[in-house]
Image (cartoon, helix red, strand yellow):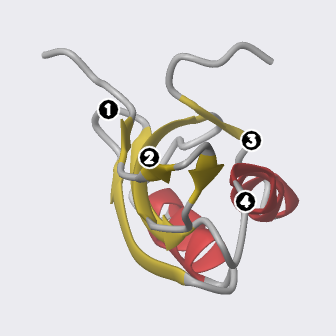
């Protein structure tokens, strides 16, 4: 299964418009069944995050958020603060 970063955004006259984005993150340190709940709670606490789906089996989180209200950095920081470093799929540290 190919994991891809999904992002929606429109470009008009060279200016980017804010939009809902859905991004897949890899998540480290998930070692038990309770870990996805903690990751979900941490990521969902970020303003404008509207959905978080965490998979223990694949060690990933799929997050939907408004990119005008928050950033990938804010989401990764929230997860890291909870003890679960995360990074968008396709990006190196």
User: Which x, y percent locates residue 40?
Assistant: 50, 70
Q: Are marks 4 and 3 in contact (CB under 8 Å)?
A: no
Between 35 and 23, the one lying in front of the other is: 23
Q: Are marks 2 and 1 in contact (CB under 8 Å)?
A: no
Q: Earlier in the sequence, mark 2 or mark 1?
A: 2
Specify the label residue 71 is tagged with: 4
Q: Which residue is mark 2?
A: 23
Residue drawn at (71%, 70%), measured in percent from left and top?
70
Q: Earlier in the sequence, mark 4 or mark 3?
A: 4
Where on the picture, by quarter, is residue 27?
top right
Number of other residues with Cα within 10 Å of mark 1, as a class: few under 14, some 14 to 19, many 20 or more: few
Image quarter where the N terminus lies is top left
User: Which x, y percent locates residue 72?
Assistant: 69, 51
SS of the residue at dot 1?
loop
Left or right? Give the position of 76 relative to 58.
Answer: right
Q: Which residue is mark 3?
A: 85
SS of the residue at dot 2?
strand
Q: Are marks 2 and 4 in contact (CB under 8 Å)?
A: no
Q: CA distance from mark 2 to mark 4?
A: 11 Å
Residue drawn at (70%, 60%), measured in percent from left and top?
75
């Amino acid at each position: 299964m190919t994991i891809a970063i999904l992002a929606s955004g429109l470009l008009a006259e060279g200016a980017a418009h804010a939009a809902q984005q859905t991004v897949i993150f890899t998540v480290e340190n998930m070692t038990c069944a309770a870990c996805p709940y903690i990751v979900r709670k941490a990521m969902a606490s970020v303003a404008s995050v509207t959905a978080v789906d965490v998979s223990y089996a694949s060690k990933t989180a799929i997050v939907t958020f408004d990119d005008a209200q928050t950033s990938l950095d804010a989401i990764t920081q929230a997860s890291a603060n909870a003890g679960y470093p995360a990074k968008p799929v396709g990006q190196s540290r």
